[in-house]
Image (cartoon, grey):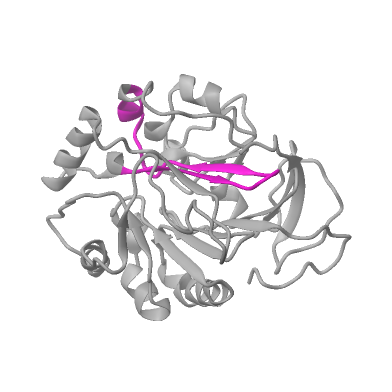
Amino acid sequence: MLHNVLTRGKRRIRVSVIKSYDVGNGDMFCILHNSDNFTTIDCNLVDDRVDELIDEVRHLSRSKTITRFISTHPDEDHIHGLETLDESIGILNFYRVDNRVAKSVETSSFKRYKELRGDPMRSFAIFKGCKRRWMNQSDGDRGSSGLNILWPDTSNSDYKSALSIAANGGSCNNVSPIIKYSLQDGVVALWMGDLETGFMEKVVDCVDLSHADILFAPHHGRRSGRPPRAWLEKISPGVIVVGDAPSDDLYYYRGYNTITQNSSGDILFDCGTGKVDVFVSSATYDASFLHYDTHGSYDGMRYVGSFATRDGS
């Protein structure tokens, strides 16, 4: 689990940790913030990892006062096991876009999503520029998490159309938000849920994007989720994480540094001032673009190198 220390090697003070879990054809991320915040983005509690994942989230959430779950959209590969997670840790802050997504077949996870979505005490709608303690606002008690929402613009006609399609039982991929995490003097990371290329091209001029050190490729890295060239040029990502999807469906982002989760397994980004150390669960994966800095292992995960951040915000 992430609370253990490295087994060897000289270390700087740890600032924050981002972990991308290898959960098959689905998404799950956790952020252990440098403030009194812990965030989970999506979940896909695959059968052979349920207990392990629940135990890790439970332990890490106990170390912070403010915990939140952000749902990009309620497809099964992004909410599978949500009811188990809620019953195990108690989701107190449930963040989602304002929607009326409907499914012809309702799984237990989707039913729990609807319950959380409609709970006025636990649910909070996210949208472009939204403000909330302690997501992106600090006070005298604690700092913010460094999370900001770049999309959706709820007045945008194409977004309204995507909401309507999802409310009538169609795909809900394009109701996904764009989430930005910024660490002062350190990493900037972007998540885009399962946004599809065709939709992104429609709103290409409607999203204010800038450099990010890590881009988690939309739609698990599929060709169908390749961001427009104009977005990639603005983001100029230091690393693109290509998700765990069938290899024939993946877009490999030629010309960019990539880590492919099909091969790397779990990926842990240990984020400090001006740099990120990268660890993976695979015993054999290698990323030649990373600079090797002679660090040790991290809770059994193997160090594969480091990269410098642009120190954006």
User: Where is the C terminus found, in terms of image quarters?
Assistant: top right
| Furthest residue in direction front, as rendered | 140
Q: In the rendered image, which quarter is residue 207 located in?
A: top left
Q: Residue at x 82, y 61 (%)?
A: 296
Q: Residue at x 14, y 47 (%)?
A: 167
Q: In the rendered image, which quarter is residue 85 located in?
A: bottom left
Q: Position of residue 282 (x, y in %)?
A: 65, 57
Q: Position of residue 301 (x, y in %)?
A: 69, 62
State whether residue 169 appears in this view: no
**Residue 64 among those drawn in magenta:** no
Q: Residue at x 25, y 30 (%)?
A: 156
Q: Position of residue 78 (x, y in %)?
A: 36, 56
For the residue pair 28 and 120, the one nearer the viewer reads as 120
For the residue pair 30 and 121, the one nearer the viewer reads as 121
- What is the magenta range? 176-201
For the residue pair 213 and 219, the one nearer the viewer reads as 213
